[in-house]
Image: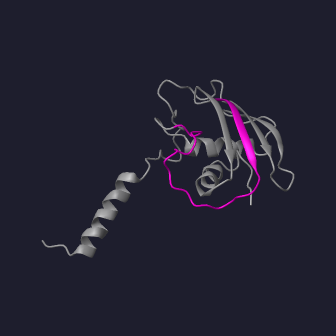
Amino acid sequence: MSLTLPRLALAAGAALATLASPVTAPAAAAVPSPLPGHQHGENDRLTVAVHGVSGGADGTFEVRCHPSGGSHPDAGGACRALERETRWGRDVFAPVPRDTLCTMQYGGPATARVTGTWAGRPVDATFARSDGCEIARWDRLVPLLPQAR
């Protein structure tokens, strides 16, 4: 069988998409632990301090997960965002790598600092909307971090 260049590229793209697809648990199954040996609820507590967001979203909020609670205006949504982004071997709060090429766009003056413990690990992360990569990093964690436009 002979593949033309466009068909070969299409087949390769489909194969890569299959490899890159996340594995998700069935909806009825319990949420798996993000890290081996970690039991949900073990000190999953975060403090989120937000500044420079319009619409009254500034402030300092507590978030607890498993079960969700705290002073955060959408603790359940914040916990779901964290769960969605948590993967074994990857720090959901990691900064953008220094060698990453990012678009030069300004997303506004919003800043945030998240401290506490998530998935059994200490967290001390800062967020800003200073370029395209930082905007995407912020937006991945909405509503833990407020929607900023």
Left or right of residue 94: residue 69:
right
Task: Name the residue: 68% across, 44% down.
Answer: 127
Left or right of residue 73: residue 103:
left
Magenta region: which residues? 91-117
Give the residue furthest to the left: 1
Q: Quadrant of the C terminus?
A: bottom right
Task: Name the residue: 50% across, 39% down.
Answer: 87
**Vertical side of 78 occupied by 64: above or below:** above
Task: Name the residue: 57% across, 61% down.
Answer: 103
Left or right of residue 98: residue 116:
right
Judge whether residue 97 is colored magenta: yes
Rendered image quadrant of residue 120: top right
How far across and how far down the image is residue 17, in percent? Answer: 38, 58
Give the residue furthest to the right: 56
How far across and how far down the image is residue 20, in percent? Answer: 39, 52
Q: Quadrant of the N terminus?
A: bottom left
Name the image colouring: one colour
Rendered image quadrant of residue 117: top right
Name the magenta segment's main secondary structure: loop
**Vertical side of 124 occupied by 37: above or below:** above
136 or 88: nearer the eye?
Answer: 136
17 or 114: nearer the eye?
Answer: 114
**Vertical side of 36 occupied by 87: above or below:** below
How far across and how far down the image is residue 12, in percent? Answer: 29, 63
Rendered image quadrant of residue 6: bottom left
How many numbered tags mark residues here? 0
28 or 15: nearer the eye?
Answer: 15
Judge whether residue 86 is colored magenta: no
